[in-house]
Amino acid sequence: MRLRHKPWAEEKLMNHPQYVVSEPEKWRGKWHELFGNNHPIHIEIGTGKGRFITEMAKANPEVNYIGIEAYTSVIVTALDRAIDAEVPNLKLLNKNALKLEEFFGQGEIERVYLNFSDPWPKKRHEKRRLTYKSFLKMYEHVLVNGGEIHFKTDNQGLFEYSLMSFSEYGLKLKYVSLDLHNSDFQGNIMTEYEEKFSGLGNRIYRCEVKYPKNEEARVELN
Ligand code: SAM
């Protein structure tokens, strides 16, 4: 993603506390209080410009959504979308997901979305992939028992790697498509990257995986 420096972006995020939570650590274990309801909470890591999370929030008012994006100059567009859509069930965090466990308490989240995550194709960068085992461990901590990861990408190498990583971690595959746009999957909401890369003729891969209900049931293979 080409990043333009936008010096005004930080101030804009600060000026919209109804959408942008600047100190998520303060809400650890209390996100339902912040949303003012007990609806399930779904997070997207690497929200980018926010089309997916905003459309999801519009389509599913009975779910609370939190979009996490490290770059200020990118998430500011997600904020514009949220303001236009007027979605009370959406919050945005301009944070690095490496700190996920500081933001959320154990079992606070029902689902993690990973959309078009950076592939980090070099082996020496494996640990940076959002489907590497240390991330899977972090997600496990903040997810409810039986929580899910929904993942899509146009990068075949990252998809293959992620299926292996999920499997080695003992996650159960609930759904897989090797060509999402030519599948019978209903209700797909396209991300910005998905529109761009499918427009170039790339196939879109998608899967849903589930953590076992009982933590002891997870078979440690590594
Ligand atoms: N999901 C969007 C889409 O499909 O259009 C954006 C995809 S873009 C390739 C990946 C995004 O993930 C980038 O905006 C990047 O800044 C963000 N990102 C990568 N690692 C992250 C992390 N650890 N925490 C927060 N954001 C991250």
Image: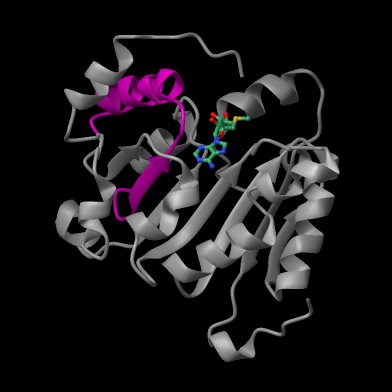
**Residue 2 placement: quadrant:** top right
Image height of 190 relative to 158, above or below: above
Name the residue nearer the viewer: 135 or 109. Answer: 135
Give the residue displayed 73% in from the left and 19% down from the top: 199
User: Horizontal placement of 153 versus 62: left or right?
Assistant: right
Give the residue displayed 46% in from the left and 33% down from the top: 70
Image height of 222 relative to 92, above or below: below
Is 73 within the magenta?
yes
User: Horizontal placement of 219 versus 26: left or right?
Assistant: right
Provide residue 179's location: percent of width, then percent of height. 80, 42
User: Horizontal placement of 180 versus 85: left or right?
Assistant: right
Provide residue 132's location: percent of width, then percent of height. 69, 56
Provide residue 126's location: percent of width, then percent of height. 76, 48
Give the extent of the magenta segment. Answer: 59-86
Is 74 within the magenta?
yes
Can residue 179 be seen at all in this image of the molecule? Answer: no
Provide residue 181's location: percent of width, then percent of height. 73, 37
Name the residue nearer the viewer: 220 or 114. Answer: 220
Name the residue nearer the viewer: 36 or 86. Answer: 36
